[in-house]
Amino acid sequence: MKKASNIAVVGATGVVGKTFIDLFESSHFLDSKIHLVASRKSKGSEITLRNSAHSVSSLQDFDFSKIDLAFFSAGANIAKEYAPRAVKAGCFVVDNSSCFRRDKNIPLVVPEVNSDALSDYVIPGIVANPNCQTIQMVVALKPLHDLFVINRIDVTTFQAVSGSGKLAQDELQIQVSQQLKGEKSSPNIFSKQIAFNVLPHCGEFEKNSYTQEEMKMVWETHRILDPNIEVGATCVRVPVINGHSESVHIETSKPINIDSAKECLRKAKGVKLLSEEGSESYITALEVDGKDSVCVGRLRKDLWSENRLNLWVVADNLRKGAALNSIQIAELLFY
């Protein structure tokens, strides 16, 4: 393993960038020097990290040759232009955008699921961080797939507005205030009003009538978990600030024993199983905010088939769905 003496966070002023900072504050790469990088408009602004003020550098002027490890969370266009530059300067990049996820030459990694994708990895280079809702789903399903062999996944996601950034969070809060005052709300970030509403529309629509977010769950599950699994997804944006929830239905090759299913999830790395009854059998997005685990609950066998199982999966999409998973990827190669 290589020491990451100098680490850059590109997109440090965004919601995921701030989550990286929170994680570096407490328990990850504590001996590394952290460099905060953002757009020119943020240059010179100060962010407190580890009890000291850190000045934000401009990406356009930043020298990556002094950086061992860079976390990019600034969108696909920025990643496309600057991530290769960072690699050319000798830097290892973990990118949170969609830019490299379908590139077969670039690993797409969830450490609990396919860390072996990095077994022969040579630094410097790029590793792609998957989409947030895919990450939490495959973490929950990997132990079940190992035990029962999943043939098909049908999933409906309930995605918080934080997945669309700070402006989306602001839009929800503004619209809630407007609605409570009896005022009219006009959508900006989203296609329709998000306050007191649900939108079956995450990402742009593809030619096959599925949205980009829905197709990401198909493509990424195939790359990370198993290319033979059929995946059907409906992605829904909900008026929640942070935390993604998923209703997941799986069909397996082997008959499912519910006790064995609970036991494998109880032992699975990165998973917290809620195995009680009633209201204690599940957790909500509000409760996972700021937590690192993928929480699984409401396990129940299908009423009609021995080979089907329903479950509820919830996680903090800014942590395990973005910043934390990226850090865990880097920790496979750096200390």
Image (cartoon, rainbow, N blue to C red):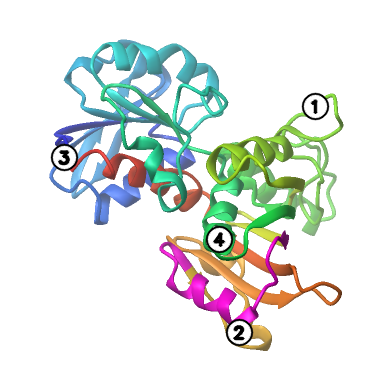
Badge nearest the viewer, 4 or 3: 4
Disc on the earlier residue, 4 or 2: 4
**Classed neighbour count for the residue bearing mark 1: other residues with Cα under 10 Å, few (<14), some (14–19), many (≥20):** few
Q: CA distance from mark 4 to mark 3?
A: 31 Å
| Magenta-colored stretch includes residue 208 | no
Q: Which residues are magenta?
A: 250-271
Disc 1 residue type (three-letter): Glu
Disc 3 residue type (three-letter): Ser
Q: Is residue 68 above or below residue 113?
A: above
- For mark 1, give the secondary structure: loop
Callout 4–callout 2 Cβ contact below 8 Å = no
- For mark 2, give the secondary structure: helix
| Percent position of residue 111, x then y | 40, 48
- For mark 3, give the secondary structure: loop
- Label 2, on which residue? 280
**Classed neighbour count for the residue bearing mark 3: other residues with Cα under 10 Å, few (<14), some (14–19), many (≥20):** some
Disc 4 residue type (three-letter): Ala
**Classed neighbour count for the residue bearing mark 4: other residues with Cα under 10 Å, few (<14), some (14–19), many (≥20):** many
Circle number at residue 206: 1
Badge nearest the viewer, 4 or 1: 4
Q: Is residue 8 above or below residue 170?
A: above
Q: CA distance from mark 3 to mark 1?
A: 42 Å
Q: Is residue 62 visible?
A: yes
Q: CA distance from mark 4 to mark 2?
A: 18 Å
